[in-house]
Image (cartoon, coloured by chain):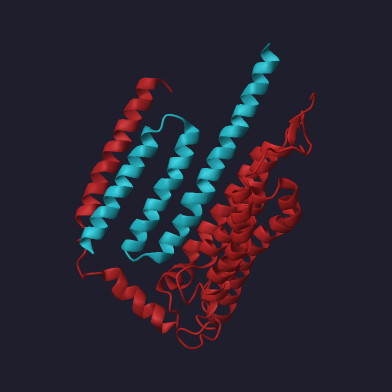
Protein backbone atom coordinates (compact mmCIF):
# COMPACT_ATOMS: atom_id res chain seq x y z
CA UNK A 1 0.00 0.00 0.00
CA UNK A 2 1.49 3.33 -1.04
CA UNK A 3 1.60 6.42 1.13
CA UNK A 4 -1.12 8.07 -0.96
CA UNK A 5 -3.52 5.10 -0.71
CA UNK A 6 -3.01 5.00 3.05
CA UNK A 7 -3.68 8.72 3.30
CA UNK A 8 -6.89 8.46 1.24
CA UNK A 9 -8.03 5.48 3.31
CA UNK A 10 -7.36 7.37 6.53
CA UNK A 11 -9.12 10.51 5.23
CA UNK A 12 -12.23 8.47 4.35
CA UNK A 13 -12.34 6.58 7.62
CA UNK A 14 -11.45 9.66 9.66
CA UNK A 15 -14.17 11.79 8.05
CA UNK A 16 -16.88 9.17 8.56
CA UNK A 17 -15.74 8.66 12.16
CA UNK A 18 -15.68 12.42 12.88
CA UNK A 19 -19.15 13.02 11.38
CA UNK A 20 -20.67 10.00 13.15
CA UNK A 21 -19.06 11.00 16.45
CA UNK A 22 -20.37 14.57 16.29
CA UNK A 23 -23.87 13.36 15.33
CA UNK A 24 -23.87 10.82 18.17
CA UNK A 25 -22.56 13.36 20.70
CA UNK A 26 -25.25 15.89 19.71
CA UNK A 27 -27.90 13.31 20.59
CA UNK A 28 -26.48 12.59 24.08
CA UNK A 29 -28.31 13.82 27.18
CA UNK A 30 -26.77 17.16 28.16
CA UNK A 31 -23.90 17.22 30.67
CA UNK A 32 -24.82 18.01 34.26
CA UNK A 33 -28.60 17.70 33.95
CA UNK A 34 -30.80 15.29 35.89
CA UNK A 35 -31.99 13.42 32.80
CA UNK A 36 -30.27 9.99 32.88
CA UNK A 37 -32.18 7.37 30.87
CA UNK A 38 -29.59 4.64 31.55
CA UNK A 39 -29.55 5.29 35.28
CA UNK A 40 -33.34 5.12 35.36
CA UNK A 41 -33.15 1.62 33.86
CA UNK A 42 -29.98 0.29 35.51
CA UNK A 43 -30.57 1.30 39.14
CA UNK A 44 -34.00 -0.38 39.55
CA UNK A 45 -32.67 -3.51 37.79
CA UNK A 46 -29.68 -3.62 40.20
CA UNK A 47 -31.85 -3.08 43.29
CA UNK A 48 -34.20 -5.82 42.09
CA UNK A 49 -31.25 -8.24 42.17
CA UNK A 50 -30.09 -6.89 45.56
CA UNK A 51 -26.80 -5.53 44.20
CA UNK A 52 -25.74 -2.37 46.01
CA UNK A 53 -22.93 -1.50 43.58
CA UNK A 54 -24.90 -0.69 40.43
CA UNK A 55 -21.75 -0.67 38.28
CA UNK A 56 -21.06 -4.29 39.29
CA UNK A 57 -24.70 -5.16 38.59
CA UNK A 58 -24.31 -3.71 35.09
CA UNK A 59 -21.01 -5.51 34.49
CA UNK A 60 -21.78 -8.93 35.93
CA UNK A 61 -25.56 -9.18 35.67
CA UNK A 62 -27.25 -6.85 33.19
CA UNK A 63 -24.56 -7.18 30.52
CA UNK A 64 -22.57 -10.11 31.87
CA UNK A 65 -22.16 -11.54 28.37
CA UNK A 66 -20.22 -8.39 27.35
CA UNK A 67 -17.93 -8.91 30.33
CA UNK A 68 -17.47 -12.53 29.25
CA UNK A 69 -16.33 -11.21 25.85
CA UNK A 70 -13.96 -8.75 27.51
CA UNK A 71 -12.44 -11.47 29.70
CA UNK A 72 -11.89 -13.60 26.60
CA UNK A 73 -10.14 -10.66 24.93
CA UNK A 74 -7.94 -10.29 28.02
CA UNK A 75 -6.86 -13.94 28.07
CA UNK A 76 -6.31 -13.93 24.29
CA UNK A 77 -4.06 -10.88 24.48
CA UNK A 78 -2.09 -12.32 27.41
CA UNK A 79 -1.53 -15.54 25.44
CA UNK A 80 -0.53 -13.53 22.35
CA UNK A 81 1.91 -11.31 24.21
CA UNK A 82 3.41 -14.29 26.08
CA UNK A 83 3.93 -16.10 22.78
CA UNK A 84 5.67 -13.07 21.28
CA UNK A 85 7.89 -12.55 24.33
CA UNK A 86 9.03 -16.16 24.82
CA UNK A 87 12.81 -16.62 24.56
CA UNK A 88 13.85 -17.44 21.01
CA UNK A 89 16.24 -20.27 20.07
CA UNK A 90 19.44 -18.24 20.35
CA UNK A 91 18.43 -16.86 23.76
CA UNK A 92 18.93 -18.70 27.02
CA UNK A 93 17.51 -17.89 30.43
CA UNK A 94 19.98 -16.98 33.12
CA UNK A 95 19.55 -14.97 36.25
CA UNK A 96 21.86 -12.00 36.48
CA UNK A 97 22.74 -11.58 40.17
CA UNK A 98 23.64 -7.88 40.23
CA UNK A 99 20.65 -5.72 39.39
CA UNK A 100 21.80 -2.32 40.59
CA UNK A 101 21.09 -0.47 43.81
CA UNK A 102 17.78 0.46 45.40
CA UNK A 103 17.41 3.51 47.63
CA UNK A 104 16.82 2.64 51.30
CA UNK A 105 13.68 4.84 51.35
CA UNK A 106 12.30 3.02 48.28
CA UNK A 107 12.89 -0.33 49.98
CA UNK A 108 11.15 0.83 53.16
CA UNK A 109 8.10 2.18 51.34
CA UNK A 110 7.92 -0.93 49.17
CA UNK A 111 8.01 -3.35 52.10
CA UNK A 112 5.49 -1.31 54.12
CA UNK A 113 3.09 -0.96 51.20
CA UNK A 114 3.33 -4.55 49.93
CA UNK A 115 1.00 -6.10 52.56
CA UNK A 116 -1.22 -2.99 52.61
CA UNK A 117 -1.71 -3.17 48.82
CA UNK A 118 -2.47 -6.89 48.91
CA UNK A 119 -5.09 -6.40 51.65
CA UNK A 120 -6.69 -3.54 49.68
CA UNK A 121 -6.67 -5.72 46.55
CA UNK A 122 -8.47 -8.60 48.30
CA UNK A 123 -10.90 -6.11 49.85
CA UNK A 124 -11.73 -4.56 46.46
CA UNK A 125 -12.34 -8.00 44.90
CA UNK A 126 -14.40 -9.36 47.79
CA UNK A 127 -16.62 -6.27 48.19
CA UNK A 128 -17.16 -5.80 44.46
CA UNK A 129 -20.91 -6.28 44.68
CA UNK A 130 -21.36 -3.88 47.58
CA UNK A 131 -18.85 -1.03 47.26
CA UNK A 132 -16.95 0.45 44.30
CA UNK A 133 -14.55 -2.02 42.78
CA UNK A 134 -14.80 -5.61 41.70
CA UNK A 135 -12.78 -8.38 40.16
CA UNK A 136 -11.06 -6.35 37.51
CA UNK A 137 -9.99 -3.43 39.69
CA UNK A 138 -9.01 -5.62 42.63
CA UNK A 139 -7.16 -8.02 40.36
CA UNK A 140 -5.08 -5.22 38.90
CA UNK A 141 -4.31 -3.89 42.40
CA UNK A 142 -3.20 -7.37 43.53
CA UNK A 143 -1.09 -8.00 40.44
CA UNK A 144 0.63 -4.61 40.63
CA UNK A 145 1.03 -4.86 44.40
CA UNK A 146 2.97 -8.11 44.10
CA UNK A 147 5.55 -6.30 42.00
CA UNK A 148 6.38 -3.96 44.89
CA UNK A 149 8.55 -6.87 46.00
CA UNK A 150 10.64 -6.34 42.89
CA UNK A 151 10.87 -2.59 43.51
CA UNK A 152 11.77 -3.02 47.18
CA UNK A 153 13.60 -6.32 47.18
CA UNK A 154 14.96 -8.20 44.28
CA UNK A 155 13.89 -10.17 41.24
CA UNK A 156 14.71 -13.57 42.83
CA UNK A 157 12.46 -12.65 45.78
CA UNK A 158 9.63 -11.80 43.41
CA UNK A 159 10.26 -15.00 41.48
CA UNK A 160 9.81 -17.04 44.67
CA UNK A 161 6.64 -15.19 45.72
CA UNK A 162 4.89 -15.68 42.40
CA UNK A 163 5.44 -19.07 40.77
CA UNK A 164 4.40 -18.21 37.22
CA UNK A 165 2.87 -21.63 36.52
CA UNK A 166 0.37 -21.14 39.34
CA UNK A 167 -0.70 -17.81 37.87
CA UNK A 168 -0.95 -19.30 34.38
CA UNK A 169 -3.35 -21.86 35.82
CA UNK A 170 -5.23 -19.11 37.70
CA UNK A 171 -5.65 -17.18 34.46
CA UNK A 172 -7.29 -20.10 32.67
CA UNK A 173 -9.29 -21.28 35.69
CA UNK A 174 -10.72 -17.77 36.09
CA UNK A 175 -11.73 -17.54 32.44
CA UNK A 176 -13.17 -21.06 32.43
CA UNK A 177 -14.97 -20.40 35.74
CA UNK A 178 -16.86 -17.50 34.15
CA UNK A 179 -18.05 -19.78 31.33
CA UNK A 180 -18.99 -22.58 33.76
CA UNK A 181 -21.06 -20.20 35.92
CA UNK A 182 -22.73 -18.99 32.72
CA UNK A 183 -23.57 -22.56 31.72
CA UNK A 184 -24.94 -23.39 35.19
CA UNK A 185 -27.13 -20.29 34.78
CA UNK A 186 -28.23 -21.57 31.38
CA UNK A 187 -29.14 -24.96 32.81
CA UNK A 188 -31.04 -23.64 35.83
CA UNK A 189 -32.67 -20.42 34.57
CA UNK A 190 -32.76 -20.95 30.81
CA UNK A 191 -30.46 -17.99 30.05
CA UNK A 192 -26.65 -17.98 29.69
CA UNK A 193 -25.19 -16.25 32.80
CA UNK A 194 -28.66 -16.21 34.34
CA UNK A 195 -28.64 -15.46 38.09
CA UNK A 196 -29.26 -18.80 39.80
CA UNK A 197 -28.05 -18.04 43.36
CA UNK A 198 -30.08 -16.71 46.30
CA UNK A 199 -29.67 -12.93 46.34
CA UNK A 200 -29.58 -12.13 50.05
CA UNK A 201 -30.31 -8.71 51.51
CA UNK A 202 -29.32 -5.50 49.72
CA UNK A 203 -25.98 -4.18 51.00
CA UNK A 204 -24.91 -7.37 52.78
CA UNK A 205 -21.55 -8.86 51.88
CA UNK A 206 -23.17 -12.17 50.95
CA UNK A 207 -25.79 -10.89 48.55
CA UNK A 208 -26.01 -9.98 44.85
CA UNK A 209 -26.39 -13.61 43.63
CA UNK A 210 -23.92 -14.48 40.90
CA UNK A 211 -22.50 -10.92 40.69
CA UNK A 212 -20.04 -11.47 43.52
CA UNK A 213 -19.05 -14.94 42.29
CA UNK A 214 -18.44 -13.72 38.74
CA UNK A 215 -16.51 -10.76 40.10
CA UNK A 216 -14.37 -13.21 42.08
CA UNK A 217 -13.49 -15.42 39.11
CA UNK A 218 -12.70 -12.31 37.06
CA UNK A 219 -10.40 -11.26 39.91
CA UNK A 220 -8.60 -14.62 39.74
CA UNK A 221 -8.28 -14.35 35.97
CA UNK A 222 -7.02 -10.75 36.02
CA UNK A 223 -4.39 -11.46 38.69
CA UNK A 224 -3.23 -14.47 36.68
CA UNK A 225 -3.22 -12.65 33.35
CA UNK A 226 -1.45 -9.52 34.59
CA UNK A 227 1.20 -11.43 36.54
CA UNK A 228 1.92 -13.74 33.58
CA UNK A 229 2.10 -10.78 31.20
CA UNK A 230 4.46 -8.77 33.42
CA UNK A 231 6.56 -11.85 34.18
CA UNK A 232 7.16 -12.36 30.45
CA UNK A 233 8.33 -8.75 30.14
CA UNK A 234 10.56 -9.15 33.21
CA UNK A 235 12.03 -12.36 31.86
CA UNK A 236 12.91 -10.68 28.57
CA UNK A 237 14.47 -7.85 30.50
CA UNK A 238 16.24 -9.60 33.34
CA UNK A 239 16.91 -13.27 32.76
CA UNK A 240 17.09 -13.76 29.00
CA UNK A 241 20.60 -13.55 27.55
CA UNK A 242 21.86 -14.11 24.05
CA UNK A 243 23.64 -17.42 23.52
CA UNK A 244 27.23 -16.26 23.11
CA UNK A 245 27.72 -14.02 26.17
CA UNK B 1 -18.98 21.14 41.72
CA UNK B 2 -18.93 22.56 38.18
CA UNK B 3 -15.83 24.60 39.01
CA UNK B 4 -14.14 21.40 40.22
CA UNK B 5 -15.06 19.64 36.97
CA UNK B 6 -13.62 22.53 34.93
CA UNK B 7 -10.39 22.48 36.96
CA UNK B 8 -10.06 18.69 36.69
CA UNK B 9 -10.71 18.74 32.93
CA UNK B 10 -8.13 21.52 32.44
CA UNK B 11 -5.51 19.58 34.40
CA UNK B 12 -6.27 16.46 32.31
CA UNK B 13 -5.85 18.49 29.09
CA UNK B 14 -2.54 19.94 30.31
CA UNK B 15 -1.19 16.55 31.41
CA UNK B 16 -2.29 14.96 28.12
CA UNK B 17 -0.52 17.66 26.13
CA UNK B 18 2.59 17.14 28.24
CA UNK B 19 2.59 13.42 27.34
CA UNK B 20 2.36 14.24 23.62
CA UNK B 21 5.09 16.88 23.83
CA UNK B 22 7.53 14.74 25.84
CA UNK B 23 10.43 14.08 23.49
CA UNK B 24 11.46 10.54 24.45
CA UNK B 25 9.30 7.41 24.91
CA UNK B 26 10.61 6.80 28.44
CA UNK B 27 9.69 10.34 29.44
CA UNK B 28 6.28 9.70 27.92
CA UNK B 29 5.88 6.59 30.09
CA UNK B 30 6.43 8.64 33.25
CA UNK B 31 4.23 11.54 32.11
CA UNK B 32 1.58 9.00 31.07
CA UNK B 33 1.48 7.86 34.68
CA UNK B 34 0.94 11.47 35.82
CA UNK B 35 -1.75 11.87 33.14
CA UNK B 36 -3.44 8.73 34.53
CA UNK B 37 -3.45 10.27 38.01
CA UNK B 38 -5.16 13.42 36.71
CA UNK B 39 -7.78 11.20 35.00
CA UNK B 40 -8.35 9.42 38.34
CA UNK B 41 -9.07 12.79 39.96
CA UNK B 42 -11.46 13.69 37.12
CA UNK B 43 -13.35 10.40 37.50
CA UNK B 44 -13.65 10.86 41.26
CA UNK B 45 -14.97 14.41 40.72
CA UNK B 46 -17.50 13.02 38.21
CA UNK B 47 -18.56 10.45 40.87
CA UNK B 48 -17.34 7.35 39.01
CA UNK B 49 -15.24 5.54 41.66
CA UNK B 50 -15.29 2.22 39.76
CA UNK B 51 -13.74 3.78 36.68
CA UNK B 52 -11.29 5.72 38.85
CA UNK B 53 -10.10 2.47 40.45
CA UNK B 54 -9.57 0.83 37.05
CA UNK B 55 -7.69 3.85 35.76
CA UNK B 56 -5.55 3.92 38.91
CA UNK B 57 -4.43 0.34 38.39
CA UNK B 58 -4.17 0.19 34.61
CA UNK B 59 -3.42 3.76 33.55
CA UNK B 60 -1.00 4.83 36.25
CA UNK B 61 0.78 1.55 36.99
CA UNK B 62 0.50 -1.31 34.49
CA UNK B 63 0.63 0.60 31.18
CA UNK B 64 3.62 2.87 32.03
CA UNK B 65 5.45 -0.15 33.47
CA UNK B 66 4.87 -2.13 30.28
CA UNK B 67 5.94 0.79 28.09
CA UNK B 68 9.17 1.07 30.11
CA UNK B 69 9.88 -2.66 29.91
CA UNK B 70 9.14 -2.70 26.16
CA UNK B 71 11.49 0.21 25.51
CA UNK B 72 14.29 -1.50 27.45
CA UNK B 73 13.75 -4.82 25.71
CA UNK B 74 13.85 -3.11 22.31
CA UNK B 75 17.01 -1.18 23.21
CA UNK B 76 18.74 -4.36 24.33
CA UNK B 77 17.70 -6.06 21.10
CA UNK B 78 18.97 -3.17 18.98
CA UNK B 79 22.29 -3.02 20.82
CA UNK B 80 22.75 -6.73 20.16
CA UNK B 81 21.96 -6.36 16.44
CA UNK B 82 24.41 -3.48 16.32
CA UNK B 83 27.15 -5.61 17.90
CA UNK B 84 26.54 -8.35 15.37
CA UNK B 85 26.84 -5.88 12.50
CA UNK B 86 30.31 -4.81 13.54
Q: Colour of chain B?
A: cyan
Q: Position of residue A107 (x, y in %)?
A: 64, 51
For this orientation, the residue located farthest to the top is B86
Residue at 64%, 22% (x, y): give it: B79
| Residue A211 against residue A218 in the figure, above or below | below
Q: Is residue B62 left or right of residue B1?
A: right
Q: Is residue B57 left or right of residue A98?
A: left
The image quadrant where one finds the N terminus of chain A is top left
Q: Is residue A1 left or right of residue B47?
A: right
Q: Position of residue A28 (x, y in %)?
A: 23, 59
| Residue A208 against residue B13 in the figure, above or below | below
Along the line of sight, which residue is nearer the eye, A62 or A5?
Answer: A62
Residue at 55%, 38% (x, y): give it: B68
Q: Position of residue A154 (x, y in %)?
A: 71, 47
Along the line of sight, which residue is nearer the eye, A98 or B9?
Answer: A98
Q: Is residue A99 left or right of residue A2?
A: right
Q: Is residue A215 visible?
A: no
The image quadrant where one finds the C terminus of chain A is top right
Q: Quadrant of residue A42?
A: bottom left
| Residue B5 against residue A124 in the figure, above or below | above
Along the line of sight, which residue is nearer the eye, A140 or A145?
Answer: A145
Along the line of sight, which residue is nearer the eye, A132 or A197?
Answer: A132
Q: Quadrant of residue A188?
A: bottom right
Residue at 60%, 28% (x, y): give it: B75
Residue at 42%, 29% (x, y): give it: B23
For this orientation, the residue located farthest to the front is A104
Q: Is residue B28 visible?
A: yes
Chain that the image shows in red? A
Amino acid sequence: MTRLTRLILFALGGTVMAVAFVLAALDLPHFGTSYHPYRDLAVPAAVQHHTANVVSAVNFDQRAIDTFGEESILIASVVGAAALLRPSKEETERLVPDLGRTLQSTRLIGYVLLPVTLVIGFDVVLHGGVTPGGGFQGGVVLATGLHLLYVAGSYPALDRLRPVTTFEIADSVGAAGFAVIGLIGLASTGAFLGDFLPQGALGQIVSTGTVQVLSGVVGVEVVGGMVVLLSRFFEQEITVQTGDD
Amino acid sequence: MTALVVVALTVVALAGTAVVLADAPERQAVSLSVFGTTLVILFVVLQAPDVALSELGVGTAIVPLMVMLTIRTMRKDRARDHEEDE
